[in-house]
Amino acid sequence: MERQRLILKEQVPLSKYTTFGIGGPARYVAEPQDLEELREALLFAEEEGLPYLILGGGSNVLFPDEGFQGVVIRLARMNQVELKGNILEAEAGTTLKRLISVARDAGLSGLEPFIGIPGELGGAIVMNAGLKGHEIGDRLVSVTLLTFDGYVEELPPQELGLAYRKSRVRDMGIIIKARLQLTPGDPSHIDQEIERYLQHRKDTQPYGQKSAGCVFKNPAPEVSAGKLLDDAGLKGYRQGDAMYSEKHANFIVNLNQARARDVLALVELGKQRVREMFGYELEEEIVVIDAWGNNL
Ligand SMILES: Cc1cc2nc3c(=O)[nH]c(=O)nc-3n(C[C@H](O)[C@H](O)[C@H](O)COP(=O)(O)OP(=O)(O)OC[C@H]3O[C@@H](n4cnc5c(N)ncnc54)[C@H](O)[C@@H]3O)c2cc1C
């Protein structure tokens, strides 16, 4: 079979690749389908003297209106999945939705709580995505990284600095695949659990609207950022087409043509009000990126 060449696009609006639907053009977007092409994409960035940025499902990032003057490397095509007994091995670009569905079909339980998180496996590990009582890190057996000096290393989760909505992965390399430990379960019960978790999301979050999930981390385990923002009167507060959701104040939604600068203005307002009214310093959960690919 003839090998396809690395897909490389120019001047692509990043709004297309983010659940926020926000972001100006990327100079290049590379879409590797395997490790070899990933290395090729990295080499391309190096040869062009451009910064690069790894993108998963784009469900936790805010790109600037000016776009990104470098190479966005989207991992969505690196999405092979394999089952080995109760262990699910998947490439970083596999969506959580697909992993949940593969596990369900094999009668394996453990991923149901993550239904409705619109990210990919790599992004979910980097952010240690989850919800109360469940984090993706709890399921990890190992993570395979392409390190910044070009080595492929399989590491146990203990080495990734996983904590509440964070990890050290971005300082270590690029996740290429991971292994998850699941437990046998009855498919009809798994279906019920999936439905239950999804319904809870629909009841409590602006499901179906453009957003990047929760904007801020909870400032302490029993202190909800959403409640603080709500008590600060921010539900429904709007700047341009960006708005603190009326359903869940820790979500900023893009009503139509929101710009990154509108979102950032709301972020600053939220921090300021919560600091002044309740004395808590809110920290962003969303990853805010500048035009050179730095996390702000
Ligand atoms: C409607 C909605 C609901 C959400 N609900 C939740 C929730 O309940 N719980 C929760 O935790 N989050 C939630 N989120 C946020 C988001 O979906 C998660 O953080 C998700 O895991 C991010 O994955 P991603 O693939 O989209 O990452 P991206 O947004 O693409 O990337 C996030 C960061 O990880 C880096 N990255 C991505 N892939 C790799 C890789 N392979 N190697 C190295 N670095 C990488 C990126 O450079 C970036 O810095 C929600 C978002 C939305 C829009």
Image (spheres, rainbow, N blue to C red):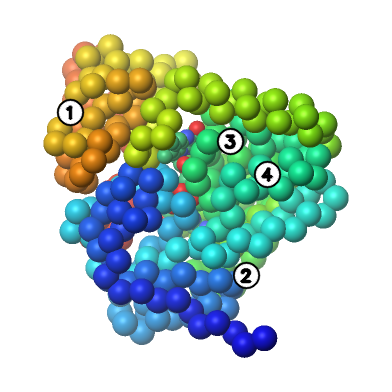
Q: In this rendering, does residue 45 appear at all?
A: yes
Q: Is mark 3 within 8 Å of ligand 1?
A: no
Depth check, mark 3 against mark 2: the one in front is: 3
C-alpha span from label 3 to label 1: 29 Å
Where's the N terminus, which quadrant? bottom right
Sequence-earlier tag: 4 or 2:
4
Q: x%, y% of residue 179?
A: 70, 52
Asked which secondary structure carries label 4, the reply is helix
Depth check, mark 4 against mark 2: the one in front is: 4
Q: x%, y% of residue 169?
A: 51, 53
Asked which secondary structure carries label 1, the reply is strand
Residue situated in front as seen by the camera: 40 or 95:
95
Residue highlighted by disc 2:
152
Measuring 58% from the left and 35% from the top, which residue is drawn there? 115
3 and 2 marks in contact (CB < 8 Å): no
Image: 282 above or below 9: above
Q: Residues within 10 Å of mark 4 (few under 14, many from 20)?
A: some
Sequence-earlier tag: 3 or 4:
4
Report the side of 109 relative to 184 (left or right). Answer: left
Residue highlighted by disc 1:
238
Residue situated in front as seen by the camera: 232 or 18:
18
Sequence-earlier tag: 1 or 2:
2
Sequence-earlier tag: 3 or 1:
3
Residue highlighted by disc 4:
101
C-alpha span from label 4 to label 1: 37 Å
Residue 115, disc: 3
C-alpha span from label 3 to label 2: 30 Å
- Give the number of callouts: 4
Residue 207, disc: none
Q: x%, y% of residue 154?
A: 67, 61
